[in-house]
């Protein structure tokens, strides 16, 4: 029995550690979203708590007038929305027209469906904003509070021993009767036994507390590294990735009755038609970049492989984005060292793969067809934690607004990474959220408690959405909602499709505290 309890505890600790650590926004815990809640254009910013349970600060900006109420409701991914408490009513922010704020509780680590409902003269509209809640720091107890709690604990300890002794000595005596020497001795024995029992309980509680703290600290300090290997096949460099546990399987795997299996499945969903988005960033050459889409190479969706494009030899970081059926957007990381590329033509593993190796030219980058991608004043005076001003214009060689084609269903993609590798985020015009996570949380049905059911349905929806995507975007403007989480030097890569070709532009900026 003891070994079963130990194994179960280890499994729970391991699962909790994974949930605490893995996130789609490495170093960028906040969630940014721009879209519509029915007829209302909205921008939603969620400042996640650093500990759980904790309160998330939700700001909703509605750019259309006539709004009467804004409500927000965080729903844990596998909870029936009907069983949730009443939504929180966001309050208008003084001095900021159309902006509303609310504090909502996030209790458990994992993914949440943050439903934002806007009511006004155009009726009622709602939108789902996926939010990943996780612990990002350990808080230290302030000394005055610690002393106060210690005094209170000592008072309770002595009080409990007094109750033990009184119960053994006088519990069955009539009122006013004096205890006999035998009962006095019994009271002392019970108090001694109670002291031993309470001390053992305190020791066990401290051991549990220390173990939990060490486990969380270890997971916070140690990134989740996905195993990888580089090989050369017929002159082509091939990168292979192996998800380390069937916890991430997209196909149900039978449970084991014993052992450290976590007893469940976590199916993967295609996001923009891809099971994985892999970003390769240079360490020796920070300007080198690739956005790749590895191909699944096994029946469980746990092994991936991709051709490495014509990047120069050297050390690289990679960030692998996947989305789970639960709406959990996850980023895994690793490092590789690439050998020198061969002189043979490099054929990408996926037609949507793209890469870049060049310098950051300033505020304007010239694309291969002579058009220009311009960062419109966003680099000047930018500071951490405020809107980053990631506004870009695409103009043709004559200076007119250019038409761009969809790239993976979006007008454009952007990657923001700090040069030390501690901040990474993949952005779309909708913000930091994963579109697949938004679908998974918004379309979940009661029957989706069967692992894989929702993943299968969403895969079909994803394919149909990719077929029905718009053929072009004519205004030539891109905006990516985001705020730099802290000071440092950042690289930004912006990707668009022009004339059937994926174009990548690079920018570099320094952010003040």
Image (cartoon, grey):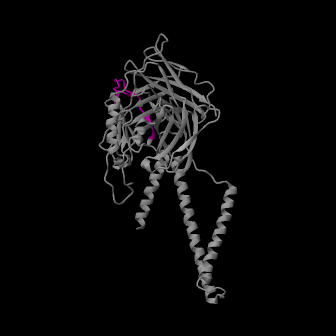
Q: Is 348 part of what is drawn in magenta?
A: yes
Name the chief secondary structure element in magenta. Answer: loop
Q: In this view, does 390 lie above or below 486?
A: above
Residue reaching furthest to the right = 144
Q: Which of 389 and 129 is in front in this view?
A: 129
- Seen at 48% across and 43% down, the residue is 132
Indicate left or right for 230 with 34 as reference.
left
The boundaries of the magenta stretch are: 330-353
Q: Residue 290 lies in what quarter of the image?
A: top left
- The quadrant where residue 325 appears: top left
Query: Residue visible at 41% across and 65% down?
Result: 3
Estimate the x, y position of residue 429 in percent, counting from the top left. Answer: 47, 29
Up the image or down, 413 lies above or below 126; here it is above
Work out whether residue 28 can be spotted.
no
Count of labels in the image? 0
In this rendering, the answer to whether 445 lies above or below 205 is: above
Given the current orientation, which residue lies at the most extreme top position? 398
Residue 117 is a magenta residue: no
Choose between 402 and 293: the one closer to the eye. 402
Q: Position of residue 404 (x, y in %)?
A: 42, 20
Image position, residue 279 (x, y; %): 44, 33
Task: Work out whether residue 134 or residue 359 is closer to the camera in this orientation and state it.
Answer: 134
Q: Is residue 433 left or right of residue 379?
A: left
Which quadrant: the N terminus?
bottom left
The quarter of the image holding the C terminus is: top right
Farthest-out residue, left: 299
Query: Is residue 403 in view from this perspective?
Result: yes
Residue 504 lies, in percent from the top left, at 45, 23
Q: In which quarter of the image is residue 153?
A: bottom right
């Amino acid at each position: 029995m003891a070994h079963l309890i130990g194994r179960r505890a280890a499994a729970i600790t391991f699962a909790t550690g994974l949930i605490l650590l893995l996130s789609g926004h490495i170093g960028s815990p906040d969630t940014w979203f721009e879209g519509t809640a029915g007829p209302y254009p909205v921008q939603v910013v969620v400042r996640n708590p650093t500990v759980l349970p904790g309160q998330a600060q939700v700001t909703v900006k509605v750019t259309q007038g006539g709004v009467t109420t804004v409500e927000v409701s965080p729903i844990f991914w596998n909870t029936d929305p009907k069983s949730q408490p009443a939504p929180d009513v966001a309050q208008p922010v003084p001095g900021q027209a159309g902006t509303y704020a609310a504090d909502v509780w996030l209790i458990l680590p994992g993914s949440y469906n943050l439903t934002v409902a806007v009511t006004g003269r155009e009726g009622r509209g709602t939108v789902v904003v996926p939010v990943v809640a996780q612990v990002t720091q350990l808080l230290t107890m302030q000394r005055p509070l610690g002393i106060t709690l210690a005094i209170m604990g000592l008072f309770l300890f002595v009080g409990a021993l007094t109750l033990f002794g009184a119960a053994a000595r006088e519990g069955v005596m009539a009122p006013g009767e004096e205890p006999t020497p035998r009962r006095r001795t019994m009271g002392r024995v019970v108090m001694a036994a109670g002291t031993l029992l309470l001390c053992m309980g305190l020791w066990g509680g401290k051991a549990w507390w220390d173990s939990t703290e060490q486990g969380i600290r270890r997971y916070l300090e140690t990134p989740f590294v996905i195993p990888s290997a580089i090989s050369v096949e017929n002159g082509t460099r091939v990168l292979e990735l192996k998800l380390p546990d069937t916890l991430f399987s997209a196909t149900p795997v039978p449970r084991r009755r014993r052992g450290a299996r976590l007893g469940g499945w976590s199916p993967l969903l295609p996001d923009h038609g891809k099971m994985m988005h892999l970003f390769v960033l240079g360490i020796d050459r920070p300007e080198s970049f690739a956005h790749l889409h590895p191909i699944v190479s096994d029946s469980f969706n746990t092994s991936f492989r991709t051709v490495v494009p014509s990047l120069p030899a050297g050390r690289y970081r990679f960030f692998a984005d996947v989305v789970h059926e639960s709406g959990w957007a996850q980023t895994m990381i690793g490092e590789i060292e690439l050998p020198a590329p061969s002189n043979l033509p490099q054929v990408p593993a996926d037609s949507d793969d793209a890469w870049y190796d060049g310098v950051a030219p300033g505020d304007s980058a010239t694309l291969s067809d002579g058009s220009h991608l311009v960062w419109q004043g966003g680099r000047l005076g930018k500071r951490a934690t405020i809107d980053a001003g990631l506004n870009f214009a695409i103009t043709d060689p004559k200076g007119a607004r250019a038409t761009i084609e969809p790239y993976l269903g979006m007008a454009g993609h952007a990657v923001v990474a700090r040069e030390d590798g501690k901040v990474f985020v993949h952005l779309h015009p909708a913000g930091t959220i994963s579109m697949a996570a938004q679908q998974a949380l918004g379309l979940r049905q009661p029957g989706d408690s069967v692992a894989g059911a929702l993943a299968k349905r969403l895969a079909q929806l994803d394919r149909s959405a990719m077929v029905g995507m718009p053929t072009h975007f004519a205004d030539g403007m891109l905006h990516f909602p985001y705020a730099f989480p802290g000071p440092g030097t950042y690289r930004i890569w912006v990707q668009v499709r022009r004339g059937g070709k994926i174009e990548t532009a690079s920018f570099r900026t320094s952010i003040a505290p």
